[in-house]
Amino acid sequence: MDLDRTRPIDRKTLLPYYAQLKQILIESVEDQRLKAGDRLPGDHELAEHFGLSRSVVRQAMAELETEGLVARQRGKGTYLAREKVSEGLAGWIGGLADDARRRGSRVTSRVVRCEVVPADSRVAGLLSLPERAPVVLLERVRSIDGEPWSHTTTWLPSSLVPGLEKEDFAEQSLYALLRERYGLVFGRVRRSIEATPAEESTARHLGIEPSDPVLRLSSVLMDTADVPIETFVAFHRGDRSRFDVELESDGSVGAPVAVRATAAPN
């Protein structure tokens, strides 16, 4: 951002300085056609240029960050935030590839592991299997249009998907394969979302810092007989994803029905 092209603070108006600075920065982003990821001036530089205290500058930047317009990275600086894109993973039975395709994006995967392993007690419980029953473990780093997006680990009963561990999932959709090759018919799905700090392995896979915020999406998919088919845990980048929920009431008091939930890229 070229600060020499910005207008000065108006010392005569009653509008607070921090509010003026916010508006000046927003105007400059638009006028100078800055793009998502462009670096913005630091607090010290802004304070010096506009003749403001650091506390006023920090207040303006904090509000811009809260509003999702900038992203501040400790030790690196302040950047123009990327727009978050909604994904429909929380409210419909589909996978990331299906959802991205609806938005005109392309999903690719880097497979970290794909092998048959004994189910631990947690996975066995979710899939209604005996402990140590064979399951296919598929761990992938998933990218949308070339950008690392989620770190996903999936477990499926090996008896339902013989030979799945030999498949190439670089571009192939798991859910399409389950439907088309294995003839599985999806019934209901149970999914939950929570915010959590990224662990080191997830941060490394997604190109973020350890403890950066990620959205943890967990899921159990059943067939039409309510038998578990698949369970996964996916960590989506908090700076690129947002989950929106749309609710529709059936007319009775206190009885909303969720009809769509989406998550979005920044």
Image (spheres, rainbow, N blue to C red):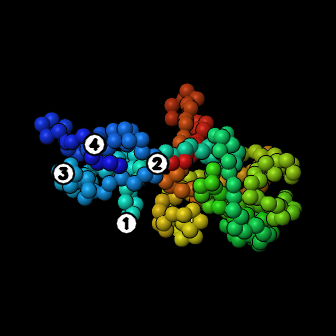
Instruction: Give the distance between the C-alpha atoms of the residues marked 3 and 4, in whole angstroms.
Output: 15 Å
From the viewer's perspective, tell me whether residue 41 is left or right of residue 254: left
Q: Which residue is mark 2?
A: 36
Q: Give the spatial CA distance, label 4 vs label 2.
A: 19 Å
Task: Say which label, 3 or 4, has the lower sequence index.
Answer: 4
Label disc, if present, on residue 75 of the rendered structure: 1
Name the element at disc 1: loop
Does label 4 or label 2 sit earlier along the sequence? 4
Q: Mark 1 near mark 2, Cβ–Cβ under 8 Å?
A: no
Give residue 22's position: percent from left, percent from top: 29, 43
Secondary structure beneath dot 4 equals: loop
The residue depicted at 51 percent of the width and 35 percent of the height is 254
Q: Are marks 4 and 2 in contact (CB under 8 Å)?
A: no
Q: Nearer the viewer, mark 4 or mark 2?
A: 4
Tell me the amino acid under the disc marked 1.
Gly
Q: Which residue is mark 3?
A: 52
Query: Compared to 230, does 112 lie above or below?
Result: below
> What residue is shown at x 17% (from left), y 39% (from top)?
10
Q: Tell me the distance, in whole angstroms, between the alpha carbons under discs 1 and 2.
A: 19 Å
User: Which residue is rendered at x = 20% and y = 55% of the image?
Assistant: 48
Residue 26 placement, left or right of 166? left
Question: In x, y percent, where is residue 40?
Answer: 36, 52
Residue 189 visible at all: no
The crowding category of the residue bearing disc 4, from other C-alpha atoms within 10 Å (few below 14, some 14 to 19, many at least 20), is: some
Q: Of 51 and 266, which appears nearest the observer?
A: 51
